[in-house]
């Protein structure tokens, strides 16, 4: 309980840092310095006005020095980050894997926000994911049982994630005569693959395509965008990656469906066969 609370607080603080990354990275500004200022009156934001969520409430969503409104997005990102960290704690416990999976969800959160607004995925995050995913793969109990299997699963995930999108990008370019898939998406999936293995990373791509198509069709139907306008794929990839962390392996899901189907068929449609087993 106490551990979970500490992880949640830590998530709030890192969520605040996520806001800094989301604002500064696409604008090519340093995420370390200078200290945060109000975008309107440029006055420095003191530490007591920079406390995650609480400052937003106490300041009544306004800058202390001018009447500039602070966007609701900031506390929302902080809360989402804290909830994701807490979920990772519930999944993995207070283990060696917790820091690396917190890095994964933190990166996915920042990538979703940046790609949604700017249609770019910062290479720094994809590279970070590849390095952390591969180097901690031997501890990743969710990949396989033995150390050797975990390392090879992680490497296969890297190849399957990056390779699949790379092939799609080449085919897309050949068919549509323009870039259908960004290099950022390819690197992101290579990174996510090192954490979740080949099976799940393929499922991530499938899920993201499905979500992207549904949203894309809806947007076209409601005339929000024209057919030619590109829709960023990155946010769907990142959100699907988060979802897949909580799902069992695709092969297990398929197995369970087959088992249930067999039971239903035997029970309701072929009850006379039940005695033969
Ligand atoms: Zn201000």
Image (spheres, rainbow, N blue to C red):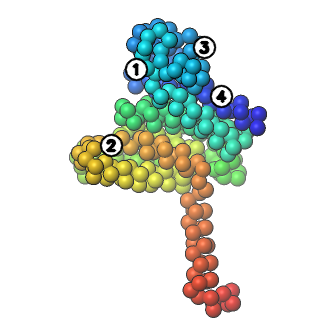
Q: Is residue 174 above or below residue 29?
A: below
Q: Nearer the viewer, mark 2 or mark 1?
A: 2
Number of dots carrying numbers: 4
Residue 193 in sight here? no
The N terminus - image quarter: top right
In the picture, the disc for residue 231 is: 2
Judged from the image, the secondary structure of the residue bearing numbered disc 4 is helix
Q: Label 3, on which residue?
A: 48
Label 2 crowd (10 A; few <14 / some 14-19 / many >=20): some
Please name the residue that numbered disc 1 is placed on. 28
Q: Earlier in the sequence, mark 2 or mark 4?
A: 4
Q: What is the x, y in percent for residue 88?
A: 64, 41
Q: Nearer the viewer, residue 198 or 63?
A: 63
Q: Are marks 1 and 3 in contact (CB under 8 Å)?
A: no
Is label 1 or label 4 in front? 4
Front position among marks 3 and 4: 3
Question: Which callout, 1 or 3, points to the residue nearer the camera?
Answer: 3
Closer to the N terminus: mark 1 or mark 4? 4
Image check: 166 left or right of 253?
A: left
First of labels 3, 4 by sequence position: 4
**Residue under label 4:** 10
Callout 1 secondary element = loop
Question: Which mark, by number, is residue 252?
Answer: none
């Amino acid at each position: 309980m106490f551990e979970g609370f500490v992880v949640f607080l830590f998530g709030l603080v890192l969520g605040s840092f996520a806001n800094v990354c989301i604002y500064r990275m696409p604008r090519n500004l340093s995420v370390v310095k200078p200290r945060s200022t109000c975008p309107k009156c440029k006055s420095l934001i003191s530490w007591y006005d920079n406390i995650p969520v609480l400052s937003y409430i106490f300041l009544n969503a306004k800058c202390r020095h001018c009447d500039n409104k602070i966007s609701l997005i900031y506390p929302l990102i902080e809360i989402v980050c804290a909830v994701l960290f807490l979920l990772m704690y519930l999944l993995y416990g207070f283990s060696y894997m917790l820091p690396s999976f917190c890095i994964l969800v933190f990166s996915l959160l920042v990538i979703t926000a940046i790609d949604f607004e700017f249609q770019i995925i910062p290479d720094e995050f994809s590279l970070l994911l590849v390095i952390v995913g591969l180097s901690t793969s031997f501890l990743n109990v969710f990949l396989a049982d033995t150390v050797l299997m975990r390392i090879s699963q992680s490497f296969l995930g890297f190849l399957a994630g990056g390779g699949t999108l790379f092939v799609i990008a080449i085919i897309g370019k050949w068919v549509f005569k323009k870039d259908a898939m960004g290099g950022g998406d390819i690197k992101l999936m290579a990174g996510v693959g090192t954490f979740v293995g080949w099976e799940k990373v393929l499922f991530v791509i499938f899920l993201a395509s499905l979500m992207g198509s549904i949203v894309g069709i809806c947007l076209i139907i409601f005339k929000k965008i024209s057919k030619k306008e590109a829709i960023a794929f990155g946010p769907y990839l990142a959100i699907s990656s988060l979802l897949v962390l909580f799902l069992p392996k695709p092969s297990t899901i398929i197995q369970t469906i087959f088992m249930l189907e067999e039971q239903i068929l035997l029970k309701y449609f072929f009850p006379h066969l039940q005695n033969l087993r």
